[in-house]
Image (tube, helix red, strand yellow):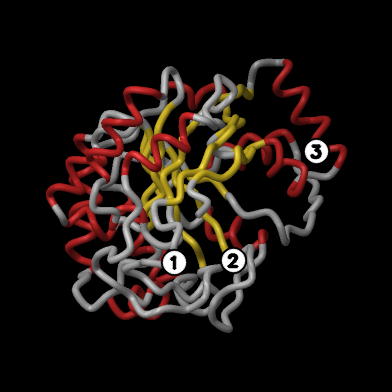
């Protein structure tokens, strides 16, 4: 039984030591089309449970000061773990300066106990793939007890009182949640959520069902459809093809005003001459770097004082 895995060098979260809260088998309240795990019927609770002392004992032997985050995940959904509150308290006693992070599909936030437990974590990553009930059911194939309207409401409530760093992840599936209508619904909800970063992704690993992702170019186009006050980040680059377009100084500033980009984005979008123009703008302090989580974004200097309207 392998409970601990890694550390993995995560571009978004740093050096991550994973904790699998369902090491025996897949136990999840979703059966997502894009999941890299085999298809399996959804459940609303774990029936095979690893004890807290077993997790802590194994975690102690792997912890070091080189680990940035202890990532609670699962062969399924980590919030279904029945001793999550006790486990987080136990981890807090041994973690030192290492932060705690959970990767969750958000559905269990409707449970008051889970909601309050997640408030204890240093970082929380919530998935939110769709707002429309029909599209949500098609992509995430949730347990029959899950209602997306209730989940969205709890995500909004959680974001208003959570004190740690909150990340939202949206995974786009071709022909399902990549429509203008669904993106607008996501945009309207995201404007009501206080997130440190919103990661846009797509299918990067072989999926459980015969579905396909979208290209980096399509992700970039979608990113521009969201309100420019939202902290959007394009997370998927495995199948990215360079665009290498030519941008003038004004176009560079306008592009970064609409959507801050990382250096990886720049390499994919800008040709060599445009990258030189960008470096000149950085040297002139017209463009500056802003760190969000573990990522460094390039933004116009004038946007440093930009505040999101609540």
Query: In the rendered image, which quarter is residue 145 located in?
Result: bottom left
Q: Which mark is residue 142?
A: none
Q: Badge 3 local density, few (<14 within 10 Å), some, or many (20+)?
A: many
Query: Residue 261 location in percent, x, y?
Result: 61, 39
| Residue occupying the point 33% across, 26% down | 92
The residue at the far left in this view is: 112
Q: Nearer the viewer, mark 1 or mark 3?
A: 1
The residue at the far top in this view is: 284
Judged from the image, the secondary structure of the residue bearing numbered disc 2 is: loop
Q: Is residue 45 left or right of residue 198?
A: left
Q: CA distance from mark 3 to mark 2?
A: 30 Å
Q: Which residue is mark 2?
A: 203
Query: Residue 102 location in percent, x, y?
Result: 39, 44
Query: In the rendered image, which quarter is residue 264 located in?
Result: top right
Contact? badges 3 and 2 (CB < 8 Å): no
Q: Is residue 51 left or right of residue 149?
A: right
Query: Residue 98 location in percent, x, y?
Result: 46, 24
Q: Which residue is mark 1?
A: 25
Quarter of the image with the C terminus in it: top left
Judged from the image, the secondary structure of the residue bearing numbered disc 3 is: helix
Q: Is residue 89 above or below residue 259?
A: above
Is residue 274 visible to the viewer in this orientation of the structure? yes
The residue at the far bottom in this view is: 210
Q: Is residue 87 left or right of residue 211?
A: left
Disc 1 or 3, which lies upstream in sequence?
1
């Amino acid at each position: 039984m392998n409970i601990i895995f890694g550390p993995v060098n995560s571009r978004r979260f740093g050096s991550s030591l994973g904790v699998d809260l369902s090491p025996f088998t897949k136990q999840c309240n979703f059966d997502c089309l894009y999941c890299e795990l085999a298809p399996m019927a959804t459940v609303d609770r774990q029936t095979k449970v690893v004890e807290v002392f077993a997790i802590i004992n194994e975690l102690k032997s792997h912890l070091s000061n080189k680990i940035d985050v202890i990532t609670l995940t699962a062969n399924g959904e980590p919030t279904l773990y029945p001793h999550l509150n006790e486990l987080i308290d136990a981890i807090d006693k041994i973690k030192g300066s290492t932060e705690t992070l959970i990767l969750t599909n958000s559905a269990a936030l409707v449970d008051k106990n889970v909601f309050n437990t997640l408030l204890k974590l240093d970082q929380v990553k919530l998935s939110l793939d769709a707002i429309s009930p029909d599209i949500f059911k098609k992509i995430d194939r949730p347990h029959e007890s899950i209602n997306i309207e209730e989940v969205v409401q709890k995500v909004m409530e959680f974001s208003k009182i959570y004190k740690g760093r909150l990340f939202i992840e949206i995974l786009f599936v071709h022909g399902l949640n990549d429509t203008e209508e669904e993106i607008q619904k996501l945009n309207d909800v995201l404007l009501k959520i206080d997130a440190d970063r919103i990661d846009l992704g797509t299918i990067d690993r072989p999926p459980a069902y015969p579905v396909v992702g979208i290209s980096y170019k399509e992700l970039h186009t979608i990113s521009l459809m969201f309100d420019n006050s939202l902290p959007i980040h394009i997370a998927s680059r495995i199948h990215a093809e360079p665009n290498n377009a030519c941008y003038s100084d004004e176009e560079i500033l306008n592009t970064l005003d609409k959507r801050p980009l990382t250096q990886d984005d720049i390499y994919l979008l800008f040709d060599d001459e445009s990258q030189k123009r960008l470096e000149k703008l950085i040297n002139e302090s017209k463009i500056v770097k802003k760190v969000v989580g573990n990522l460094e974004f390039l933004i116009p200097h004038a946007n440093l004082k930009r505040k999101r309207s609540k």
